Amino acid sequence: MSQAPNELNSKKAFFLTMEGLEGTGKSSVIFYIKDKVDKLGVSLKIFREPGSTLIGEQIRSILLDRKNEELSVYTELLLYLAARTQLIEEKLKAASSIVITSHQSPDGDAVGSSLSLYHYLKAKGKEVSVILPDASPKFLNWMNGVDVINIYESDSENCQQLIKNASIVFSLDYNDLKRVGEMGDLIAQGDAYKVMIDHHLHPGDFADWMYSDTNVCSTAQMIYEFITNLGDEQMIDTVMGQGMYVGLITDSGSFRFPSVDARTHEIAASLLRKGLIHSEIHENLFDVNTLDRLKMLGYSLSQKLKVLPNIPVAVIYLSKEELDQLDNKKGSTEGLVNYALSLEGVKMAALIKGDENKVKMSFRSKGDVPVNEFSGAHFSGGGHKNAAGGVSFDSFEKTIEKFEKVIYEFWNS
């Protein structure tokens, strides 16, 4: 499948239905198809229903009945959405304990979406806990509810018990259990009903209920839609909205990435109408630089930024020793790679920094440069087309040498 068929290039919608027993390979086929159509620029949504509830089974029988073959695709879509909503609503009503999780090295979208969902479920009268694999950056510590977050790295015994006792475990802003470290095995082996809400490519097959949309700019936007689809948009207040807005602006580059669409701005506008003071959030996120961080920024741009010869790629190299001398706090290099990308004529930028026993990388790009594919092919990473991360367990020097070799291969391929 090297190019999209004419039908896929049209504005029509199509449904592919997979039927079969457990373990017969349905998921493998689905994700193979999704991988192919993603590369063609065609949007594919994955639904695991209808079914699992009385209403769901009735809807399923309607959709599979040959007498209903003339149903419009929009009618089918509404029926699917009704079945999915009914299922998760019943699960939430029955849940005695809910755990919300997000990925390692949590960013604004991970923390924001987790806290938004936390406040919503608390407002619904549920017993809820938030667990992150490790601590979030200091610049997020002002957010409402951040003090209730459990950190697995420093309180593993308590977190293990919370996961073990959970009726539902939410996986937010990640689609592979490897992204939560040791917590992944606990979630996989637990009896809890598993719910994934995420916007990254290539979702894993661990969730019982999946909301995956790779065209959305943030998981926070998906949490707004999730609550709305449950009929509770009127419940969204400024406390829930704070986390949503943080996720929206941090994962969209303050609304400038190509994944931002009209709906993103509509949701932001809705939050403002509910009374959210967006200027305070911007100040708390972006106007809290320390002197050390500004010195690190100045050093990085004046001494460590370089544009590679003959290709529109800029890179900043920072060794662990340099960071230790400057400002090596969690989150201190947040957004640094974007300065490199802002150079005139540059289409791709990288931040390569030394860390304890590994080298971390951040990649950003403009237009049709798929940094997620580059990172996945060479640095065990992934993410979005224009924003991805990676890691190397080679030395800092060998990692730089490898990067400067493979980036030319990638660019000239």
Image (cartoon, rainbow, N blue to C red):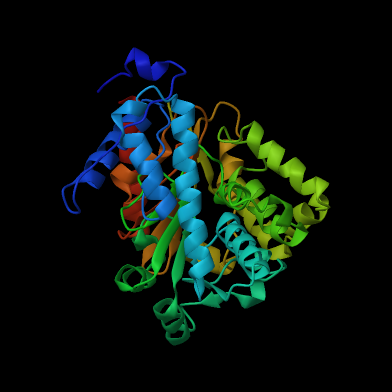
- Measured from the top left, where is residue 15 in percent x and y? 36, 30
Identified at 52% across, 76% down, the residue is 151
The number of callouts visible is: 0
Left or right, residue 289 beside residue 131? right
Q: Nearer the viewer, residue 135 or 113?
A: 113
What quarter of the picture does the N terminus occupy? Answer: top left
Identified at 44% across, 40% down, the residue is 80
**Residue 399 shows in the view:** yes
- Measured from the top left, where is residue 16 in percent x and y? 31, 32
Q: Quadrant of residue 67?
A: top left
Identified at 46% across, 48% down, the residue is 84
Left or right, residue 96 beside residue 220? left
Q: Is residue 29 above or below residue 129?
A: above
- Measured from the top left, where is residue 78 in percent x and y? 50, 36
Looking at this rendering, what residue extends furthest in the top direction? Answer: 6
Left or right, residue 174 beside residue 392? right
Q: Is residue 303 above or below residue 11?
A: below
Identified at 47% across, 18% down, the residue is 11
Q: Nearer the viewer, residue 58 or 25?
A: 58
**Residue 352 shows in the view:** no
Q: Is residue 399 above or below residue 148?
A: above
Q: Is residue 93 above or below residue 6?
A: below
